[in-house]
Image (cartoon, grey):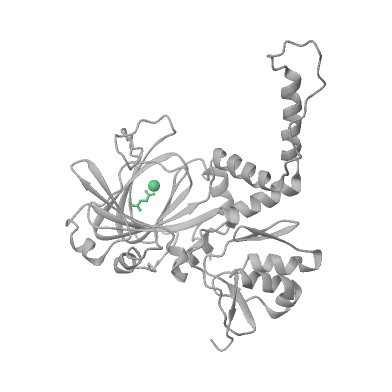
Amino acid sequence: MALSDFDPQDFLDQYWQQRPCLLEQALPDFICPVEGDDLAGLACEAEVESRIIIEQDDDWELRCGPFSETDFTKLPAKNWTLLVQGVDQWIPEVAEIFEHFRFLPRWRTEDIMISFAVDGGNVGPHFDNYDVFLIQGAGQRRWQVGQHCDEQSSLRQHDQLRLLSNFDTQNDYLLNPGDILYIPPGVAHWGHGVGDNCITLSVGFRAPSSGELLGHWADALAAELNESQRYRDPKLVADAESAFIPDSVLNELRTHLQQKLDDDVFLRKWFGELMTATHKHSIEVYEQQGEQFSLRLGARLAYDAYYLYADGQAFSYSEHQKNAVKALCQLEGDAILAPELCQQLGETLLQELQKNAILIMDDDDY
Ligand code: SIN
Ligand code: CO
């Protein structure tokens, strides 16, 4: 399922994390897997994160879901957008869209957010901190692409939305179904629905901030340490100025912290777990009987030379399981894991993955 007329390596070299790029008709004859009513239905569910943004007189109002049916009847005729986060977790045909982006690390993809806009609907001029592919699903949207921004860029006064005070339009595009606009982190963008049925699918990527990475790493590490591992003095001098912190203390401390960072097994395990962690909804552990296994919709998998990572957990595996682990991580949609690979994976790991609802058992007549 490659994008049409698209050279992945050229895209990675020239655009990825650098410059915006319009991929016209990258998905020719694209059939949008959802309609506005489907999104409105999802936005009424408590487990689904949704928002409505209404623009009026150069000001934007944010309403957060879950919504009720009557909330939708009270909306103005123009200038509003409904945004539903993580639609790939609920609709398999939406999750299939990820398959077009397999030229990128699979564990970097985060979710597919879908917006439905009436004429003029827009979420305001802004930038995001992660890469996004904006796929036009239905109707048309005008996208203005602006300047590179960062934490210093000045924002409008708004309690809930981070909207830019200045927008310097550098490109102006009209997207039709099947067109994709790639926006790297930090690039200003502003889309307006054209007509009353504009659906845009945003394929977003997981990019933890350095603060999140360090905080998460330190928490995970601290959980494995014990109370007897503590600060120790470097060689002390008896008559030293007693309030002074000498460089030798800092050097000792740096060595102590560096040793933790150099723990390769810990670092890889922590990172694999972090990048595959899912926001688990009320996942049911299926009690179905059957012989065949497929992945649960929304399961996140990755592997390295030592571990299989699935939904934020690391499972160690050995050499003879390697091919099966690799194949498992590459399963798409409801495809089943071939019986010989199940056998290679072995009863223990299969059961463990099933217990955690990463693998689900399919009834083979189904
Ligand atoms: C939208 O779909 O209206 C907004 C998506 C975005 O700007 O990231
Ligand atoms: Co955006």
Relative placement, left or right, of 344 versus 218 is: right
| Residue at the (73%, 28%) spot, across then down | 253
Relative placement, left or right, of 354 versus 171 is: right
Q: Quadrant of residue 234?
A: top right
Task: Tell me if residue 339 comes above or below residue 144 in the rendering.
Answer: below
Residue 96 x, y percent position in the rendering? 49, 67
Relative placement, left or right, of 361 versus 308 is: left
Task: Tell me if residue 31 comes above or below residue 339 in the rendering.
Answer: above
Closer to the camera, 103 or 226?
226
Closer to the camera, 292 or 179?
292
Relative placement, left or right, of 125 versus 350 is: left
Residue 260 x, y percent position in the rendering? 73, 39
**Any part of residue 104 in sight:** no
Task: Tell me if residue 102 comes above or below residue 264 in the rendering.
Answer: below
| Residue at the (70%, 49%) spot, across then down | 268
| Residue at the (58%, 57%) spot, across then down | 106
| Residue at the (72%, 48%) spot, across then down | 266
